[in-house]
């Protein structure tokens, strides 16, 4: 019997589930998607479309058998910033070439796995590597939480309080709620947190910028700022190719290992080995091509999202249909100005409360990998 409320091949049963489950997934991946674009200085609106296209490409190449969500990669931030600074800035053409480098490395590993099998890959990256890497990913992501909740700002007290309330709502809902409510803990936490922030702002106790955000709507439709329209072939020099390879090749290996780790964790959650079926070679192929497309569309490579894995783990909704619709929802936000305004109006402290659960869950999943594989830490090599 499946441990999931909705298994990978199952679909939502009514309109409520078709709408709320995907929205929950969108809200879980939204903050990292936008944050990475903000850090790199790439257009925020089109980064949403990049995540949409990346997930759809991934789903097609994995034959719609994996519920993983693909969006902007944090592992490649340094490479993107470096490429943008080459020659005439911002050099989006250099980033696009970097996307090709990422795709080629992923495809190379996919071919090796297809040829030699997962046993060979597991010897290179055993649980003694994958587990700690997953733990480090979760703990590294957790370093963003103080910034989310506004430590050091004038809203520090309110930010911390609302973040903790949001976290508690998610945790308590996941643990004690019954029926449908138990499957949307993040959506409930976000809703309660948003209402609290709005009430605090309306009472004049502090400001989160919610009302100001809603004043900036000047149209209903938005035309995304595609970065491939900014490619500057005239100023590109062949000598930049080596710099681009040196920037993207190392981080590609790191992102590849993160991809493997995320899929191992998701496999343990849903009770199906995604590295065997649809196969790690397919998922790597999908992620690599999605990264290439992402650099062309929004200037950012893509990667698997631990936030989506954590959402699936807490909600027990592993439907591929939900992840696919969530991707379409995310992509539509690039064209609908009021929805973008609403998402921009959500205070970061609310995302901070969600992150306390999400990033902690990712780190604990790494520990679970070590335990489930019965890793012997008495062995000096393993330790």
Image (spheres, grey):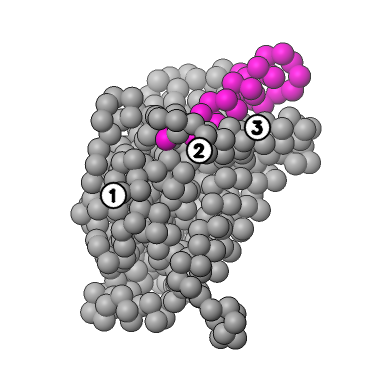
For the stretch drawn in magenta, what is the main secondary structure? helix
Q: Which residues are magenta?
A: 183-212
Name the residue located 56 percent from the left edge and 39 percent from the top edge. Answer: 171
Disc 2 to disc 3, C-alpha distance: 14 Å
Query: Can you see residue 231?
Result: no
Q: Are marks 2 and 3 in contact (CB under 8 Å)?
A: no
Q: Residues within 10 Å of mark 2 (few under 14, many from 20)?
A: some
**Left or right relative to 44: residue 210:** right
Q: Residue at x 57, y 45 (%)?
A: 357
Residue extending furthest toward the top: 203
Of 59 and 14, the residue lying toward us: 14
- Residue 86 vs 43, above or below: the answer is below
The front one of 121 and 184 is: 184
Residue topped by disc 1: 1
- Residue 206 on the magenta segment: yes
Q: Please say if the residues under marks 1 and 3 sit with CB atoms less than 8 Å apart.
A: no
Label ID, residue 343: none
Between disc 2 and disc 1, the foreground one is: 1
User: x, y (%) of residue 162?
Assistant: 67, 31
Q: Residue at x 55, y 57 (%)?
A: 364
Q: Residue furthest front?
A: 1
Mark 2 sits on what residue? Answer: 174
Q: Residue at x 31, y 75 (%)?
A: 118
- The disc placed on residue 165 is 3
Which is nearer the N-term, disc 2 or disc 3? 3
User: Which quarter of the figure is the C terminus placed in?
Assistant: bottom right
Snapshot quadrant of residue 210: top right
Q: In the drawing, does residue 118 fall left or right of residue 334?
A: left
Q: Give residue 262's position: percent from left, percent from top.
A: 43, 59
Determine the image quadrant of residue 108.
bottom left
| Mark 1 secondary-structure assignment | loop
């Amino acid at each position: 019997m499946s441990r999931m409320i909705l298994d990978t091949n199952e679909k939502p049963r009514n309109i409520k589930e078709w709408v709320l489950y995907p929205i929950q997934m969108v809200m879980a991946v939204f903050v990292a998607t936008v944050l990475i674009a903000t850090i790199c200085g790439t257009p925020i609106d089109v980064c949403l479309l990049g995540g949409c296209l990346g997930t759809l490409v991934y789903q097609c190449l994995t034959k719609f058998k994996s519920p993983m969500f693909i969006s902007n990669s944090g592992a490649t931030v340094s490479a993107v910033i470096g490429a943008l600074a080459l020659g005439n800035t911002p050099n989006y053409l250099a980033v696009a070439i970097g996307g090709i480098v990422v795709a080629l490395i992923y495809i190379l590993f996919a071919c090796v796995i297809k040829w030699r099998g997962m046993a060979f890959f597991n010897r290179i990256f055993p649980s003694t590597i994958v587990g700690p890497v997953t733990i480090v990913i979760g703990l590294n992501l957790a370093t963003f939480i103080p910034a989310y909740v506004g430590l050091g700002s004038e809203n520090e007290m309110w930010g911390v309080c609302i973040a903790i309330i949001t976290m508690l709502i998610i945790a308590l809902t996941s643990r004690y709620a019954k029926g449908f409510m138990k499957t949307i803990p993040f959506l409930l936490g976000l809703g309660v947190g948003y209402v609290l922030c709005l009430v605090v702002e309306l009472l004049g106790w502090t400001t989160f910028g919610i009302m100001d955000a809603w004043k900036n709507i000047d149209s209903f439709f938005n035309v995304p700022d595609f970065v491939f329209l900014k490619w500057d072939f005239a100023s590109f020099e062949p000598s930049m190719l080596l710099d681009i390879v040196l920037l993207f090749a190392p981080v590609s290996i790191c992102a590849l290992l993160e991809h493997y780790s995320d899929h191992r964790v998701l496999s343990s959650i849903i009770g199906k080995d995604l590295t065997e079926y649809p196969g790690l070679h397919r998922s790597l192929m999908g992620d690599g091509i999605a990264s290439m497309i992402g650099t062309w569309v929004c200037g950012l490579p893509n990667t698997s999202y631990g936030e989506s894995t954590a959402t699936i783990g807490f909600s027990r909704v592993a439907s591929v249909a939900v992840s696919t619709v969530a991707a379409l929802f995310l992509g539509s936000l690039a064209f609908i100005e009021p929805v973008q305004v609403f998402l921009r109006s959500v205070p970061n402290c609310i995302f901070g409360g969600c992150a306390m659960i999400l990033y902690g869950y990712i780190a604990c999943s790494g520990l679970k990998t070590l335990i489930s594989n019965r890793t012997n830490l008495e062995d000096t090599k393993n330790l």
